[in-house]
Amino acid sequence: MLPPGKPLSRFKVLDLSRVRAGPTCVRQLADWGADVIKIEAPPDGKEGLGGDRDNSDFQNLHRNKRSLTLNLKAEEGREIFYKLVADADVVVENYRPDVKNRLGADYETLAKINERIILVSISGFGQDGPYGNRAGFDQIAQGMGGLMSITGAPGEGPMRVGIPVADLCAGMFAAQGTMLALLEREVSGKGQWVRTSLLEAMVQMLDFQAARFLKEGEVPGQAGNDHPTNIPTGVFPTSDGHINIAVAGGVMFERCCDALGHPEWNDDPLFSTSAARSKNRVQMNKVISEVTRTNTSEHWIELLNDVGCPAGPINSMDQVFADPQVQHLEMSVDVDHPRLGTFGVVNQAIKMSRTPSEVRTATPDQGEHTDSVLRELGYDESTIKRFHENGVV
């Protein structure tokens, strides 16, 4: 069923996750070949936390999985789950911390069934502590983790990022943690509990901004489109739009000045050093803007890149996927859905020469593989029918 030679094709993953952070983690595993069984509650006529199943977001998140409906609150449902755990490698969940204990999906319980099992838990704020049982949400984590305080223009108030970056980063860290645990298991023979949260992911992603505070005690603020330290780096107007220019260091600044036709800026006391440019960023940006608005975006992008000064367009979404370099990198890949037809989903950013990722199957319908998974576990047709009739699956 799964293609041979994929990096994770020998692993089976049970996906209990919902919404975004957990599914982001599992998508990484599925795209690289893992056998993923998405365990969902039986249909109840209500819209789930994942939203409309046929929308672009859901279809992008849940490709390469099989879907099993299972009532984990029913005793027989838990028995089926535990049979799956006995032969699985990884379980991924992003319930609130107390929920998995009530469902019997905590690490202590699962490890008694299979000592090699790896439980991956993604929460809003951690598995314990003062906020341990709070429900997590991306924008809340963006605010608590400091990102919104350094995003946006000075004086305009906090600003969220345009993607659910806390969810996505938590999911990516969880996938990394999963593979670390699988690697360690090859030595110890034992599984373990892997944990991360939206808040932890957001704090780690602050990176050099956090380091400025931890080492120098400096509390960074909003810098708008300017880089916090490397000036001039920002957005500049052109005759037909805007471009980004990024300058780091004296040599690159010299090239930028020459390309813009103003080599004298190199000797101007206002701009001659990195510290001076940072202090006088408003003046620096003003004189550059007066030059860049005299010609087109394409003109300046080609001219600046030709001399080794990074510059690029500010693309809308349609322009992103029309960009020849994005197309060359194959960042969109088609998937064939039996009901919805053929459409594009976002491809993996990692490329591997021998064992590439692959979008093999579209997102399954709810419970599409319930009967086939139960047959794999050894249940006969009469038992499977009874499970359906009793609301177990």
Image: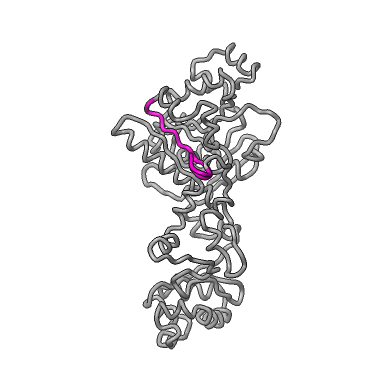
Residue 362 in the image: state x and y as whole percent: 56, 37
Of 170 and 235, nearer the camera is 170
Q: What's drawn in magenta, residue-wise?
A: 115-131
Of 168 and 253, nearer the camera is 168
Task: Residue 319: name its quadrant.
Answer: bottom right
Q: Residue, x 34% and y 30% (percent of image)?
A: 190
Of 130 and 294, nearer the camera is 130
Residue 179 in the image: state x and y as whole percent: 39, 40
Residue 112 in the image: state x and y as whole percent: 41, 23
Taking the view exactly as shown, the residue that stands out farthest to the front is 130
Q: Residue, x 44% and y 36% (percent of image)?
A: 33
70 within the magenta span: no
Dominant secondary structure of the residues highlighted in magenta in the image: loop
Q: Residue, x 49% and y 44% (percent of image)?
A: 197
Taking the view exactly as shown, the residue that stands out farthest to the right is 45
Classify residue 307 as left or right of residue 145: left
Looking at the picture, the colour scheme in use is: one colour
Residue 152 in the image: state x and y as whole percent: 57, 65
Task: Say above or below: 307 vs 199.
Answer: below
Q: Residue, x 58% and y 13% (percent of image)?
A: 383
Taking the view exactly as shown, the residue that stands out farthest to the top is 382
Classify residue 317 as left or right of residue 259: right
Image quarter of the C terminus: top right
Task: Say above or below: 80 vs 37.
Answer: above
What is the tally of numbered marks visible in this picture?
A: 0
